[in-house]
Image (cartoon, rainbow, N blue to C red):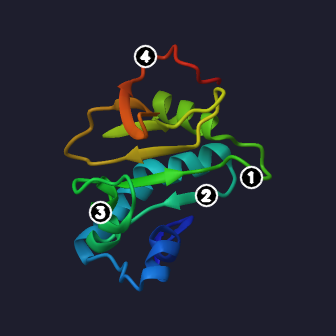
Amino acid sequence: MKISEHLDLAEITRSDTAKRLGIDNVPTPEHIENLKKLAENVFEPIRNHFRCPIHISSGYRSKELNEATPGSSKTSDHAFCRAIDIDMDGSANGVSNNDVFHYAVANLKTKQIIAEYPVDGKLSWVHIGYDENNLKNEVLICVKKDGKPHYLPYKGNEKLVK
């Protein structure tokens, strides 16, 4: 099933954890409507800007899958089809996670963008949440402190390279 021009339902619901644990990861019709909005307002603008395939490392997570995912919260936007994690590092097209992060911050209206676990100025992945009723454009950096994730406000001057 096509969610948008460049995004299939299978791509955004794919999960090795769900396969391994036998978890059903099929979204409800309401969730699919959220996916269409996420695709239209986040995924497609990124895809069209960079003119290359965009790798989603985490998309929809059913309630059961979300509970089985280390580090996720009960209120995760992934469980409502309102968030994607993008991981472009290592792709052959030269687009980096940092490129995606800076493009999204400068050009998209979102609920939240998180620069995940920067190492030596490079992001591990980029989390982008979209909720049309909550476009607060919050930008955070997630770092590990004492083995746990800590979310800090992004001020534009942290150790992230453009």
Mark 4: secondary structure: loop
Looking at the image, residue 26 sits to the left or right of residue 156; the answer is left
Cα separation between marks 4 and 3: 28 Å
Q: Which residue position is annotated with label 3?
A: 79
Task: Tell me, for residue 155, which label it has, or none.
Answer: 4
Seen in the picture, residue 83 relative to 64 is either above or below; the reply is above
**Residue 14 in view (yes/no):** no
- In space, the residues marked 4 and 1 are separated at their CA atoms by 28 Å
Decide which of tag 4 and tag 1 comes sooner along the chain: 1
- Amino acid at dot 2: His
N-term mark: 2 or 3:
2
Q: How many neighbours does mark 2 have within 10 angstroms: few (below 14), some (14-19), or many (20 or more)? A: some
Q: Amino acid at mark 4?
A: Lys
- Label 3 CA crowd tier, 10 Å (few <14, some 14–19, many 20+): many
The residues bearing labels 4 and 2 have C-alpha atoms spaced at a distance of 26 Å
Q: Which mark is residue 131?
A: none
Query: Which residue sits at x=52%, y=18%?
Result: 158
> Mark 4 touching mark 2, by CB under 8 A?
no
Instruction: Give yes or no for contact between labels 4 and 1 (Cβ–Cβ under 8 Å).
Output: no
* For marks 2 and 1 on the same chain, the one whose residue lies earlier in the sequence: 2
Residue type pointed to by label 3 = Ala
Which badge, 4 or 3, is on the more N-terminal residue?
Answer: 3
In three-dimensional space, the C-alpha distance between marks 2 and 3, rounded to whole angstroms, equals: 19 Å
The disc label shown at residue 55, or none: 2
Name the quarter where the C terminus is drawn.
Answer: top right
- Count the marks: 4
Disc 2 to disc 3: CB gap under 8 Å: no
The outermost residue toward the bottom is 22
Q: Nearer the viewer, residue 32 or 19?
A: 19
Say which residue label 1 marks: 91
Query: Secondary structure beneath disc 1?
Result: loop
Q: State if disc 1 and disc 2 touch (CB < 8 Å).
A: yes
